[in-house]
Image (cartoon, grey):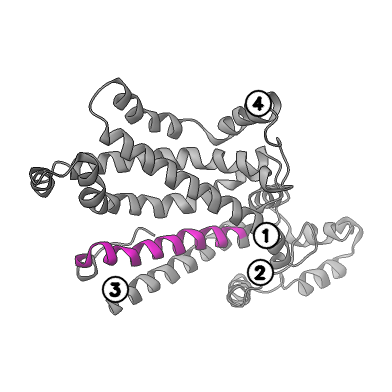
Amino acid sequence: MLRYVLGRVGQAALVLWAAYTVTFVILYLLPSDPVALQLSANNIEIDSLTEAQREQAAARLGLDRPVWEQYLGLLTAALRGDFGTSYAKGLPVTDLIAQRLPGTVTLSILAVTIALIAGTALAVIATRLPHGPLATFLRRLPAAGVSVPNFWIGLLLIQIFAFTLGWFPAMGDDGPQSYVLPAVTMAIPTAGVLAQVLIRSFDDTLGEAYIATARAKGLSRGAVQLRHAFRNAALPTLTILGLLVGATVTGSIVVETVFSRNGLGRLAQESVLAQDIPVVQAIVVIAAAAFVVVNLVVDLLYPLLDPRIARTPKVSRA
């Protein structure tokens, strides 16, 4: 078990390093001038500077060094939690992220909770009902949630629950009510995927021999489903949940833009438009960390549900 845990932790660290390195290479190849962007944040036009002043500014920012030295320097600083200074805002990147991150994390946790409850409940009800029009409708409902884009769901919810009914605010991040519509918008596609996977898992598990034995003992369909089938059916769902949680965090970019929330997703959009490389790189690393941490937790939960997994080589999903 210890080797299993150490292997998963090592793979998680490797993925984070790869995400940082690939992001650095891509951003370095962008056709932009970091010196000009940094000076513009301080209201200084680079065209007004002499060549010597430009070289001094590049040296002050560390941009006169070879690329590999810049990479090692930035990587070492990132390991200490220092991602540099924002080109566009002139503030430390960690301060900007610290201001925006709590709202996005709260929104993501709320969305994942809603998705987990709704997706699981829908799958349990759909597989428990006898075959008929209602069961068929519930089985096909998750596909609708998956196929509809986030921004359209958000606009529809704003139209109905904000403009027509007036129950929730249409935008902003003032108060608990402002979390409801964005969280539901993020939760619907995630709940749809979870319900699809769980329904298929229930169908496969309920056909196993031990399920027939449990029914032969006189247990009701609900008891068989929850007490015997759910644990095995949850394994594939747990795998996809690890990916969906990370996707929910990164999906906040669209949702926070639609609902005008000052979160990490909106900061990412602003930074991309402004070519603010340090902020973009930090956000990419945070998004990768969200994927890695959630998948690491999922990997460590697998042996608790099925101890045989810890003794079987398995390729990481991260």
**Kind of residue at disc 4:** Gln
- What's the distance in space between the residues labelled 2 and 1, CA to CA? 8 Å
Which of marks 3 and 2 precedes in the sequence? 3
On the rendered structure, is 79 left or right of 226?
Answer: right
**Kind of residue at disc 3:** Tyr
- What's the distance in space between the residues labelled 3 and 4, CA to CA? 50 Å
Which of marks 1 and 2 precedes in the sequence? 2
Residue lying farthest front? 218
Number of the front mark, 2 or 3? 3
136 and 2: which is toward the camera: 136
- Residue at image position (40%, 55%) is 242
- Image quadrant where one finds the N terminus: bottom left
Residue that carries the numbered disc 1 in the rendered image: 279
- Residue at image position (50%, 60%) is 290
Q: Is residue 28 in sight in this rendering?
A: no
In the rendered structure, are the residues bearing label 3 and label 4 in contact, judged by CB atoms less than 8 Å apart?
no
Residue that carries the numbered disc 3 in the rendered image: 4
Q: Position of residue 286 (x, y in %)?
A: 56, 61
Residue that carries the numbered disc 4 in the rendered image: 159
Q: Position of residue 102 (x, y in %)?
A: 65, 59
Residue that carries the numbered disc 2 in the rendered image: 83
Which of marks 1 and 3 precedes in the sequence? 3
267 and 217: which is toward the camera: 217
Q: Position of residue 177 (x, y in %)?
A: 67, 43
Q: Which residues are magenta?
A: 283-308
Which of marks 4 and 1 precedes in the sequence? 4
Residue lying farthest top? 133
**Kind of residue at disc 1:** Val
272 inside magenta stretch? no
On the rendered structure, is 183 left or right of 134?
Answer: right
